[in-house]
Image: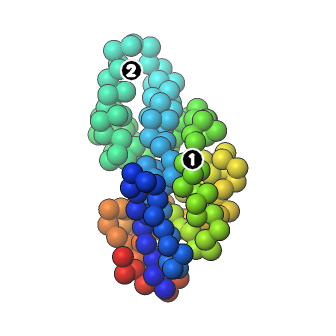
Amino acid sequence: GVITTINFSSNGLYFSNMYDAIIFSFDGTLVDSRQHHIDAYLEAIKEYKNVESKTELKYYNIILKKHFDFGIEYVLKTFLYLGDIQIREIRKIKNQKINYEQIKLKTDIIEKFKDHKNLFIISNARNDTITNIMDANKKLITLFREIITPDLFYDIKKKPDPEMGLFLTRKYFLNPTN
């Protein structure tokens, strides 16, 4: 079988049913959740550290926006000097603060492919984050055969390393020719 990534153009999506599988990246392709997470982490940091200074909050906001793509653990350890236990506590607070129903999926993309039997997601996001967003958006998670994230496979490398995609192609005997 042959797999593909999705190609976008000014006329919309191009897709052919000749592909055996379609692999989506999550954030940036199916959803834009980055700012929602930054806002929730900022609220969690404010609560956890009992921050009242607007200057300190502004600093944390700048740091989160600038370095968020490196991973929240990196940001909290490097710039806020927090340890693993503190980070877990902040993540718990963040999960209470974030409203997954406000994070809207790009359903037009999903609708175009909803009848395809082999839809997959590979993402650096945490699996529970993807599940929560999908559940808040009409249980669309059931359309996807599998979601591959580094937190489910501890020895798998994060994107842009191709390892998650290659793992998927080997598991389902797919031929990544495109």
Of callouts 1 and 2, the N-terminal one = 2
User: Of the numbered discs in the image, which one, if any, rests on residue 105?
Assistant: 1
Please indicate, yes or no, whether residue 127 appears anywhere in the rendered image.
yes
Please indicate, yes or no, whether residue 128 appears anywhere in the rendered image.
no
Q: Position of residue 73 (x, y in %)?
A: 39, 45
Is 79 left, or right, of 90 in this rendering?
A: left
> Tag 2's secondary structure?
helix
Q: CA separation, marks 1 and 2? A: 29 Å
- How many badges with numbers are in the image? 2
User: Of the numbered discs in the image, which one, if any, rests on residue 16?
Assistant: none
Q: Residue at x 51, y 47 (%)?
A: 31
Q: Position of residue 109 (x, y in %)?
A: 54, 55
Q: Residue at x 70, y 54 (%)?
A: 139
Callout 2, which amino acid? Leu
Q: Which residue is mark 2?
A: 57
Q: Decide: is 157 above or below 63.
A: below
Q: Residue at x 31, y 32 (%)?
A: 63
